[in-house]
Image (cartoon, rainbow, N blue to C red):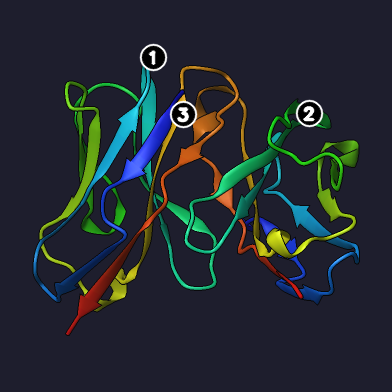
Amino acid sequence: AQSVTQLDSQVPVFEEAPVELRCNYSSSVSVYLFWYVQYPNQGLQLLLKYLSGSTLVKGINGFEAEFNKSQTSFHLRKPSVHISDTAEYFCAVTFFSNTGKLIFGQGTTLQVKP
Amino acid sequence: EAGVAQSPRYKIIEKRQSVAFWCNPISGHATLYWYQQILGQGPKLLIQFQNNGVVDDSQLPKDRFSAERLKGVDSTLKIQPAKLEDSAVYLCASSVVGTAIYEQYFGPGTRLTVT
């Protein structure tokens, strides 16, 4: 069965420091990968996606992620975080199909401290 | 363009009562999803519509949950009767069909508290 694991439930970091949020997936078939962000009391917003091509994907708000097929990982990175990046981040996968069904990880809370 | 609209934003009910949530997707989006997000967990797909047909409802507890999408536009999710474990945020999302189906746009959600 396909699954997504986010390895850290909470990541505290100081403002302007770099951050990495980790995501691993399990699948016997090829996948598409996504990172979503959820600010308090809001819906989810797409940060970036990997469908094919370059394994380094750049998204909004200065975030990027690297797809590593051999390690089945899709870690999210930002070289310098801001207070406004404090939010919940979700990794998600979908499988080569025409339904678009997403399977989400448990989420990682990024806490940016001044 | 206007985003996905949901109402109400908050609802508190007692167990065994019924409740309904409404979603209006982005104009032109044929695919509509309902997710359940329990506190501390990622969203879980309950049901997916394409136009007014059901694509996937494998994780919908059909003994108490129902959903419809009349005329292929807005949708209603109902719970009857509610249980304590139904306390969650119910998210609606929409997308186009074709290669962009994977880019889902989410509404703000309805936070349900069952007491």
Check if mark 1's residue and mark 3's residue have beta carbons within 8 Å.
no
Residue for point 8% across, 69% down: A17
Give coordinates of residue B1: x percent, y percent: 60, 55
* Camera-nearest label, 2 or 1: 1
- The answer, for residue B32, to whether it is visible in the render is no
Q: Nearer the viewer, mark 1 or mark 3?
A: 1
Residue A21 position, x and y percent, is 23, 53
Q: Amino acid at mark 1?
A: Val
Under tag 1, what secondary structure? loop
B27 and A37: which is toward the camera: A37
Q: Amino acid at mark 3?
A: Thr
Q: How many circles with numbers are drawn on the protein?
A: 3
Q: Chain of mark 2?
A: B
Chain of the residue on which disc 1 is drawn:
A
Q: Residues within 10 Å of mark 1 (few under 14, many from 20)?
A: few
- Are the residues under badges 1 and 3 in a single subunit? yes
Give the number of the disc on residue A94: 3
Q: Where is residue A66, by image quadrant?
A: top left
Q: Which residue sits at x=39%, y=55%? A: A107
Disc 3: CA contacts within 10 A as few (<14), some (14-19) or many (>=20): many
Q: Are marks 2 and 1 on the same chain?
A: no
Chain of residue at mark 3: A
Q: Amino acid at mark 2?
A: Val
* Point 34% across, 27% down: residue: A26
Q: Which residue is mark 1?
A: A29
SS category of the residue bearing label 2: strand
The spot of residue A12 in percent (x, y) is 20, 71
